[in-house]
């Protein structure tokens, strides 16, 4: 069962996505939100904190929380958010295809590349993200089989993180990310509509459970013109 602050966060986020709260609009006051959701101010503040971390609202002391512009296709690097969640927040209707879904052994070379435990079995996936009939993102995923058990191609077209957290009841903890610019390789040129671009933006994700066990390595390769990478920072 979801905690109350999670329900409030999801409710307000959905209102922002659906346009019930417009960019620049002030959200109801904390007192009003307490009445709307029949809860305490601490619970409301926790929900607003999550919305702030995702760059959906900005809270101004003494004035309230205001909805931020979310028209860009933006990936947040301050939190772990699935591709499906990012797409939903930005209102984009991506189509995902999975041309490669296979099982591999993490050998010495793959361990060096992914940092996943050598000798473990893993699912290897290519997931292509298309927008407006153009292939603009290639995700190369490795998930350890003993943690992400019974993964299927069908699940992979939707949200693997939702499957992990809701179906497997496993908590995702934290991630390390590396962002690089690389020359487009033959895999990029085969799977992406590169147009005249000869380089890609590469985001490498090393993702861990709460206990520090790494279960995922993802290399997300993006055509550079369609995406803006940003973080939402707040001065303390």
Image (cartoon, grey):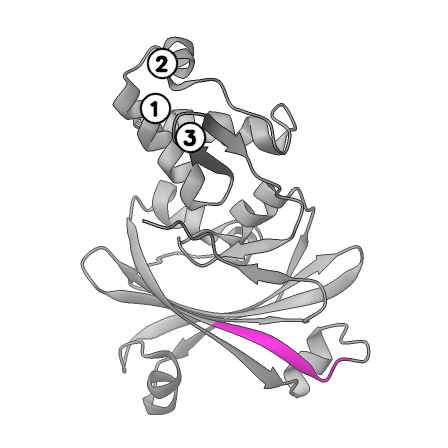
Residue 129: x and y in percent read 65, 60
Q: Residue furthest left?
A: 211
- From the viewer's side, name the closer residue of 158 and 104: 158
- Is residue 144 visible in the rendered image? The answer is no
Residue 31 position (above or below residue 195): above
Taking the spot 58% from the left edge, 31% from the top edge, the residue there is: 16
Residue where numbered disc 1 is placed: 44
Q: What span is colored magenta in the figure? A: 197-203
Of marks 3 and 1, which one's residue comes earlier in the chain?
3
Give the camera-side residue of 84 and 86: 86
Which residue is labeled 3 in the image?
A: 9
- Kindly report which numbered mark, 2 or 3, lies closer to the viewer in this rendering: 2
Marks 1/2: CA–CA distance:
7 Å
Residue under the image location 60 percent in, 48 percent down: 87
Q: Which of pointers 3 and 1 indicates the residue nearer the eye?
A: 1
Left or right of 47 in this view: 22? right
Residue 52's label in the rendered image is none
The 10 Å Cα crowd at callout 1, few under 14, some 14 to 19, many 20 or more, is many
Instruction: State the residue position of label 2.
Output: 34
Q: Earlier in the sequence, mark 1 or mark 2?
A: 2
Q: Going 57% across and 26% down the picture, which residue do you hit?
A: 15
133 or 107, which is in the foreground? 133
What kind of secondary structure does the magenta stretch mostly adopt?
Answer: strand
For the residues bearing labels 1 and 2, Cβ distance under 8 angstroms: yes
Judged from the image, the secondary structure of the residue bearing numbered disc 3 is helix
């Amino acid at each position: 069962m979801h905690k109350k602050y999670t329900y409030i966060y999801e409710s307000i986020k959905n209102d922002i996505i659906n346009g019930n709260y417009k960019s620049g609009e002030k959200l109801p006051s904390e007192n009003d939100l307490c009445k709307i959701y029949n809860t305490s101010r601490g619970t409301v503040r926790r929900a607003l904190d999550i919305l702030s971390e995702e760059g959906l609202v900005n809270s101004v002391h003494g004035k309230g929380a205001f909805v931020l512009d979310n028209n860009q296709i933006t990936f947040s690097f301050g939190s772990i958010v699935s591709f499906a969640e990012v797409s939903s927040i930005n209102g984009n209707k991506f189509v995902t295809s999975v041309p490669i879904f296979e099982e591999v052994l993490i050998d010495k070379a793959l361990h060096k590349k992914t940092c996943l435990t050598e000798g473990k079995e893993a699912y290897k996936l290519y997931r292509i993200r298309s927008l407006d009939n153009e292939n603009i993102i290639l995700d190369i995923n490795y998930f350890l089989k003993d943690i992400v058990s019974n993964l299927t191609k069908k699940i992979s077209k939707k949200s693997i993180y939702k499957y992990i957290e809701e179906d497997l009841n496993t908590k995702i903890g934290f991630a390390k990310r590396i962002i690089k610019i690389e020359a487009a390789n033959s895999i990029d040129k085969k799977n992406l509509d590169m147009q005249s671009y000869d380089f890609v933006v590469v985001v490498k994700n090393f993702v861990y459970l709460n206990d520090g066990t790494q279960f995922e390595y993802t290399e997300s390769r993006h055509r550079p013109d369609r995406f803006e990478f940003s973080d939402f920072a707040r001065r303390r």
